[in-house]
Amino acid sequence: MICVKCGEAMRMTEKDTSSGRDIREYTCPGCGYSDWEDNGAALWKILSDDREEAEAERAARPACDGEDAQAETSAAKNAPGTSMWSRLLARLGR
Ligand SMILES: [Zn+2]
């Protein structure tokens, strides 16, 4: 990040991802001007969303236990690409 006041390269002084966003604070060593930038969703937030999704998927499975679940499993084996694609499309749709 370049200082808007004097054009020097700013130094990152703080990185705060506690809100789920990757917020970086910079301070200019030349004039002391400080600024921050938002780098989008923090990595831990993305990872924890993935984990929550996987856990939700696992939690949904025992609900359809029995013959239906077995039929579903063999169907998934016959079409291994289906669940991956539907998951990918669901993700893109978010
Ligand atoms: Zn400066």
Image (tube, grey):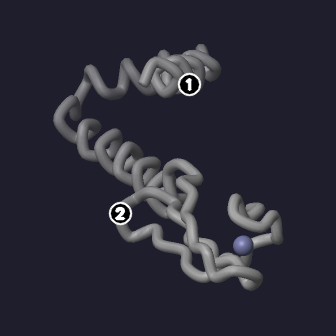
Q: Is mark 2 within 8 Å of ligand 1?
A: no
Give residue 88's quadrant in the image: top right
Q: Earlier in the sequence, mark 2 or mark 1?
A: 2
Give the percent coordinates (x, y) of residue 39. 58, 53
25 left or right, relative to 51: right
* Residue 19 numbered mark, or none: 2
Residue drawn at the location 47% of the way across and 72% of the way down: 16
Residue type, label 2 = Ser
Residue 83 seen in the figure: no
Q: Is residue 53 above or below residue 73?
A: below
Give residue 84's quadrant in the image: top right
Q: Looking at the figure, which quarter contains the N terminus?
A: bottom right
Badge 2 vs badge 1, beta-carbon distance below 8 Å: no
Residue drawn at the location 81% of the way across and 70% of the way down: 9
Q: Is mark 1 within 8 Å of ligand 1?
A: no
Give the percent coordinates (x, y) of residue 26. 62, 73
Q: Residues within 10 Å of mark 1 (few under 14, many from 20)?
A: few
Residue drawn at the location 29% of the way across and 44% of the way down: 56
32, 75: nearer the viewer: 32
12, 84: nearer the viewer: 12
Q: Which residue is mark 1?
A: 88
Q: Looking at the figure, which quarter contains the C terminus?
A: top left
84, 29: nearer the viewer: 29
Q: CA distance from mark 2 to mark 1?
A: 26 Å
Give residue 30's quadrant in the image: bottom right
10 left or right, relative to 36: right
Residue type, label 1 = Leu
Q: Is residue 63 above or below residue 56?
A: above
